[in-house]
């Protein structure tokens, strides 16, 4: 008999203070500004925020679209997002699921994501899933760390990649079918033990 294990919430100890870190807030703010410069959203669009966490990114994108589906596997991070519901300036649906194991029966005008791809083992698999979840011409705006030496995370939050090589992730996105791909620098996260580049990958189905 198969007994399913409860999912480990890697962010259980981080969720409550997640929004307090200025470097985290500044990084997500830079990502949001860059996304809004790069992608044309409109007030009839429905986006998905993959790995939405406490909602820092979607809060900044919300005024530009009709609705956002926030997808996150962490109960503790999602609990913080739920507390902020009234501050979010668009319609918000919250799905507490592991998107690598489950899916959503709808298609989106765009997918946004910040600092989540390095938590996903199968990069090509998740990009393929994004492709199927998008309408034709739907956009991706995915931000994450450049390749690093493994020192970025000081705790185990379920990390599968020490950032990404830009050429490699571009090639993966291309092989899945995305077009009009562009990768650019969003900023830099400074920590006492190192500086970590952050990129934004944009493209269309
Ligand atoms: C570093 S946090 C980033 C949160 C937010 N995007 C931000 O930039 O502030 C990564 C988030 O991805 C979520 N996550 C990791 N793997 C996931 C999966 N397979 N499905 C859905 N969410 C996942 C985690 O629970 C966590 O909230």
Image (cartoon, rainbow, N blue to C red):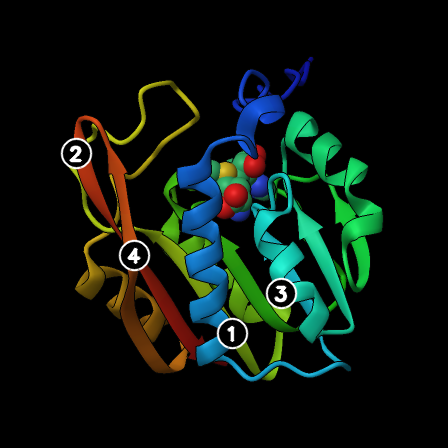
Q: Quadrant of the N terminus?
A: top right
**Mark 4 Cα shell of 10 Å, populated few (<14), some (14-19), many (≥20):** some
Instruction: Please say whether residue 107 is visible from this viewpoint.
Output: no
Give the residue at mark 2.
Answer: 194
- Of pointers 2 and 1, the one earlier in the residue sequence: 1
Dots 3 and 2: beta carbons under 8 Å?
A: no
Tag on residue 61? 3
Within 8 Å of ligand 1, the CB of disc 1? no
Dots 4 and 3: beta carbons under 8 Å?
A: no
Tell whether 173 sits left or right of 54.
left
Residue 6 image position (x, y, % from top left): 66, 17
Residue 196 image position (x, y, % from top left): 22, 44
Residue at (32%, 72%) from the top-left corner? 175
Tag on residue 187? 4
Toward the front, the furthest residue is: 22
- Of pointers 4 and 3, the one earlier in the residue sequence: 3
Give the residue at mark 1.
Answer: 36
- Of pointers 1 and 4, the one earlier in the residue sequence: 1
**Mark 3 Cα shell of 10 Å, populated few (<14), some (14-19), many (≥20):** many
Residue at (25%, 39%) from the top-left corner? 190
Residue 162 image position (x, y, % from top left): 24, 38
């Amino acid at each position: 008999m198969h007994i399913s294990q409860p999912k480990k919430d890697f962010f259980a100890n981080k969720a409550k203070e997640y929004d307090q870190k200025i470097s985290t807030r500044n990084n997500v703010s830079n990502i949001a500004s860059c996304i809004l410069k790069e992608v044309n959203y409109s007030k009839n669009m429905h986006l998905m925020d993959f790995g939405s966490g406490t909602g820092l990114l979607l809060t900044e994108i919300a005024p530009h679209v009709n609705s956002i589906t926030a997808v996150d596997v962490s109960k503790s991070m999602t609990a913080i997002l739920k507390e902020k519901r009234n501050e979010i300036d668009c319609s918000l649906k919250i799905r507490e699921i592991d998107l690598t194991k489950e899916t959503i029966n709808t298609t989106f005008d765009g997918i946004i994501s910040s600092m989540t791809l390095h938590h996903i083992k199968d990069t090509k698999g998740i990009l393929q899933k994004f492709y199927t979840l998008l309408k034709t011409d739907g956009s991706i705006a995915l931000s994450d760390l450049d390749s690093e030496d493994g020192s970025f995370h000081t705790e185990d939050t379920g990390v599968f990649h020490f950032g990404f090589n830009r050429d490699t992730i571009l090639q993966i996105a291309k092989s899945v079918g995305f077009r009009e791909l562009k990768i650019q620098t969003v900023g830099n996260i400074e920590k006492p033990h190192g500086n970590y580049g952050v990129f934004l990958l944009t493209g269309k189905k």
